[in-house]
Amino acid sequence: MSQPKRDLTFWQMFNLSFGFFGVQIAYALQSANISRIFATLGADPHQLSFFWILPPLMGMIVQPLIGKYSDRTWTRMGRRKPYLLVGAIVAVLVMLLLPNAGSLRFSSRLFLGLNMAMWFGLFSLIFLDTSINVAMQPFKMMVGDMVGESQKTEAYSIQSFLCNAGSLAGYLFPIFFTWIGIANEAPEGVIPDSVIYSFYCGAAILILCVLFTFFKVKEMPPAEYAEFHGIEPGKNEEKGEGLLSLLFKAPREFWTVGLVQFFCWAAFLYMWTYSNGAIAVNCFGVPVNDGVIDTASKAYQDAGNWVGVVFAIQAVGSILWALVIPRFRSPRTAYIVSLLIGAAGFASIFFIHNQYLLFVSYFLIGFAWAAMLALPFSILTVALEGSPYMGSYLGLFNCTICLPQIVAAATGGLVLSLIGGSQAGMLLTAGVFLVVGAICVNFVKVK
């Protein structure tokens, strides 16, 4: 049995996750602007979902490895923090390059159906998402390492709060820079300055926030960690088992929560991919010719800014709901209620043609997002208490986030064709996914 857990103060848990605020700004900028960037560079709407395969694919490869090797990393700097710092530095460098894909002097020739600017953006996206994953995963692991069972839901709710506060900032940057006079239009095939400046500002905040957590938090040494988690002395220093072996021995919660995750993350992949097109057509009247949206129009770029606004509203909903989740007596009830409310938000978008009514839709979607950020990790880390492979399991668990996005991205173009090319219809489909996810929560056993 583990030793009685000492409680952390609110500010200790806050400092533990503060760097997540900066990391999430980078992730929000990517989520809200990738479809806009690649559409501006010339991507066909039926190609857009394919660009979204790369981020979860890199996460599926990188995060289990980060978990595995950080489990064995005991240095003066810490156990998880070295990976956190390296990931943040690489992310900053790529954030300075990606939005300039259309501004560099590339040839316009096509290779495998993509022009050179899109290829540059594609490789930049690979490196950006890889580095974000490297920087993001240690925060989840440090909560699992340093917080006792009784505080885990609170600690992950704080992390969810900071995550959504970062999202709020990242989503609003483009419209803020437009408001202060930075150009929101550019020549065809070039990313507007409002987006470029947003990535620059996000990169600066990212590194500052990560450095704050890096210097403020002191991770446990091996002996203290073993005592805290009730691990036999020396066991946490063994070479350990392979990832495949651990997967076969994973607790039931790993698989049941993973099933819920599949439908939830597929739904949000559709939101990130198709919100821009759905809002542009339904609420801004952007013309569609032969299934192709006029991305060079002012209305399309205005719709792109509005996507940032409604995503920010989603973040506000998430922030507020993250404060409510710990008040539920049952995490399972909180999970089901949150997903059903989010499903209603997704479904309503299909019927809305007023840009301001979208505030209600995305606010409700934020409830589901808050639950997805806090509850799965709280449930799993409690189930893993006493395991020396916490990081490895959390890295493997990230595959339940990445795999559904890969499947949804790979099939997105087909589904879009089946429903008649309506990008708003893809968001209605996302609502159906969340309802199925809520049903699957009933299979989850919560300790």
Image (cartoon, rainbow, N blue to C red):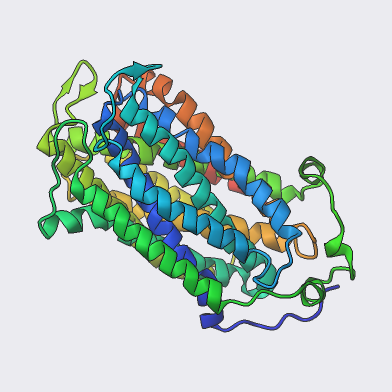
42 lies above or below 217: above
Residue 422: which quarter of the image? top left
Residue 287, percent across and down? 13, 26
> In the depicted view, which residue is nearer to us: 169 or 135?
135
x 45%, y 48%: residue: 340
111 lies above or below 425: above
Residue 418: which quarter of the image? top left
Report the side of 332 relative to 296 (left or right): right
Residue 152: which quarter of the image? bottom right
x 53%, y 55%: residue: 87
x 80%, y 61%: residue: 388
Report the side of 353 relative to 42 (left or right): left
Residue 100, percent across and down? 29, 42
Residue 261, percent across and down? 56, 44
219 lies above or below 101: below
> In the depicted view, which residue is nearer to us: 300 or 92?
92
